[in-house]
Image: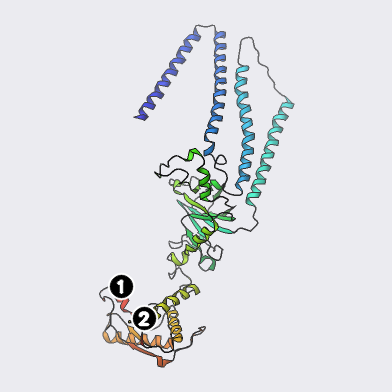
Amino acid sequence: MSFLIIFLCIVLTAVVLVQLGKVTELALANQDEGEAQDSLNTRQGFLGMVFLVGFMIFCLVSAWYYKNWMLGYGPHESASMHGDALDNMFNVTLGITYIVFVVTHIALFWYAWKYRGRRGRKALFMPHDTKLEMVWTAVPAITMCFLVVNGLIAWNEVMGDDNDEDIEIEATGQQFSWTIRYPGADGALGEKNYRMITGLNPLGQDWTDVKNLDDFMASDIVLPKGKKVRVRITAKDVLHNFDMPHFRIKMDAIPGLPTYFYFTPKLTTEEYRKNLSKYPEYQAEDPLNPGKKLWETFNYDLACAELCGQQHYAMKKVVRIVEEDEYVAWLKKQKSYYFTGGVRFTDEDPHKGYLFDVEDAAQLAEFKTNFDGALAGDDKTIILNKVEFVSGGAGLTDMSKYQIEHLKNQLNKNPNVRIELAGHTDSQGDDEGNLSLSQRRADAVYAQLTTRVANSTEQPIDPSRLVSKGYGETSPIGDNATEAGRQKNRRTEARIISQ
């Protein structure tokens, strides 16, 4: 209904203007031709002066009215150290161009009024004026030179690569999202190669580069106040643009051509919100968050400033600037993509044949807890859930040797403990074959425990402290009718028989 009323008002206004034009034509038709032309010129000149005044007032009033919403003015001072230099550059440029705008605007309509056509007045033609040409060539050239030099000074200040950044992160644009990668504890981002991009490896990280192993992905950008940040910027598909306007950052993300940007945040998100709360414009209720004011829901944003496709608007990501202690606490909660993103122990993992020290230490701590529980509790059985064999055989896999070393470690620390190594199978195959297979598997673990292993710090266990026995399929702990149950039944156990 509102649209219909607005449409009808526009149509009515157009009709009125057309009728006024017709009335004017009729009035001029009854006048002397010269007098009519003078009247028309005077009217047009007068309307130009009205526009001059009205448009100038509109520009001044609207700029003043909306200044608190514009970057660089009101509460929207730069949130980064370098932003002040860019704001100063823009203010200088705006000041010069605004003076030119005002002067040319006034001159355009004033001259149209003052030199309007009138009977008896002749035009003065100036085909050439060397002095005037020199002036309007030299003045813009000098002004442009000043602006360019000012811009270069600001650019060099912003982009100076002095290699003393505290933090480096990577932003990869794709249709239609940003992937943000952080370095782990080593503080260095690992190498990547687009040829390695897969479903499990969306950035094409080279897992043979150990710097990649602790890198992690973040859903939001979180950075500490007062620390210099280097953002490595790239894209996977089309041209994007890394735009963080509150920090005065804007840089193209180009497939195959990484770019970068340096900045140092100087205002946390909470400090920026506090500044906004001082202005009445931000006391209004946020329409997207009823019950909260605009300043309370403010967040820094990362956007794409390139029209990269139909869902370009979706490339919005929250940026949080926090105090350093909060940033450190946040870092500690982040998990390596390599270890938690589904890459570890897959065919894409070049390290799947062995454990890293941190993994080995975690497994040892877990096994020690289980071993101590068996010593103190009624259930004296410890399932060696990390001990595995080649399919259908008794050969230990490389990964099995770690838990056997953990068992050896606990037996060396508890010299009075004797254990039985029990092998079990599922119900697949014949009973005699399963019994033989379970015995051979128990014997394989026995042999590993009683043998000195190369590069191991653990002493071999005295054979008198060990017994190996195969039980075949006689002691299931799962349903042999299901694969999950059969997998549970295929196990090796360490049962404490004396302590």
Q: Position of residue 115 (x, y in %)?
A: 63, 17
Q: Nearer the viewer, mark 1 or mark 2?
A: 2
Q: Which residue is mark 2?
A: 382
What count of labels does the image hold? 2
Quadrant for residue 436, please give it: bottom left
Residue 320 shows in the view: yes
Q: Which residue is mark 1?
A: 484
In the displayed structure, 8 sits above or below 139; it is: above
Task: Give the mark, 1 or 2, whose residue is nearer the N terminus.
Answer: 2
Q: Secondary structure at mark 1?
A: helix
Quadrant for residue 415, please give it: bottom left
Q: Residue furthest bottom?
A: 464
Q: Is residue 135 left or right of residue 102?
A: right
In the displayed structure, 75 sits above or below 189; it is: above
Q: Position of residue 377 (x, y in %)?
A: 35, 81
Q: Secondary structure at mark 2?
A: strand
Residue at image location 42% in from the left, 41% down from the top: 285
Residue at image location 51% in from the left, 43% down from the top: 276
Front-most of residues 296 and 401: 296
Residue at image location 43% in from the left, 45% down from the top: 310
Q: On the rendered image, what quadrant is the N terminus found in?
A: top left
Q: Is residue 319 left or right of residue 6?
A: right
The residue type indicated by label 1 comes to: Ala
Q: Position of residue 108 (x, y in %)?
A: 61, 24
